[in-house]
Amino acid sequence: MAGWKDILLDTIKLSDEVKKLNKLSEKLSDRTIDIDKRLVRLETMVEIAQKQSSSGNLKLEDD
């Protein structure tokens, strides 16, 4: 049977590991939000380009 010191050390180690995982989870969440924002901007740009091309407002330049 493990002594109280071993149990205390395991608890401290587990607590540290949970803190590290929480920080990593927060970083991933922030990156996911950033990627989502970028995706929304890209979708908006595509929709604008589609509307402009369908209405004939999109002008292609000849080289």
Image (tube, grey):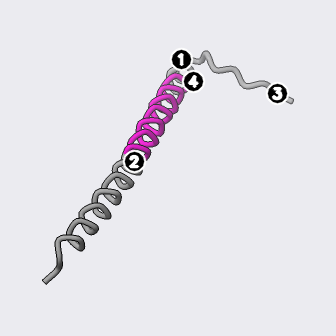
Q: Which image quarter: residue 33?
A: top left
Q: Are marks 4 and 1 in contact (CB under 8 Å)?
A: yes
Q: Earlier in the sequence, mark 4 or mark 3?
A: 4
Residue sticking out furthest to the left:
1
Residue type for callout 1: Ser
Residue 13 location (% of width, % of height): 32, 64
Q: Residues within 10 Å of mark 2 (few under 14, many from 20)?
A: few
Q: Are marks 2 and 4 in contact (CB under 8 Å)?
A: no
> Which residue bears the numbered disc 2?
23
Q: Which residues are magenta?
A: 26-49
Q: How many marks?
A: 4
Residue drawn at the location 17% of the way across and 77% of the way down: 3
> Which residue bears the numbered disc 4?
53
Residue type for callout 2: Lys
Which circle, 3 or 2, is nearer the viewer?
2
Q: Dot 1: what SS?
A: helix
> Which residue bears the numbered disc 1?
55
Q: Earlier in the sequence, mark 3 or mark 1?
A: 1
Q: Residues within 10 Å of mark 3 (few under 14, many from 20)?
A: few
Residue drawn at the location 34% of the way across and 57% of the way down: 16
Residue drawn at the location 34% of the way across and 51% of the way down: 19
Which circle, 2 or 4, is nearer the viewer?
2
Closer to us: 5 or 63: 5
Which mark, by number, is residue 34?
none
Q: Residues within 10 Å of mark 1 (few under 14, many from 20)?
A: few
**Above or below 32: residue 60:** above
> Which residue bears the numbered disc 3?
62
Inter-mark Cα distance, 3 to 1? 20 Å
Q: Quadrant of the N terminus?
A: bottom left
Residue type for callout 4: Ser
**Above or below 16: residue 43:** above
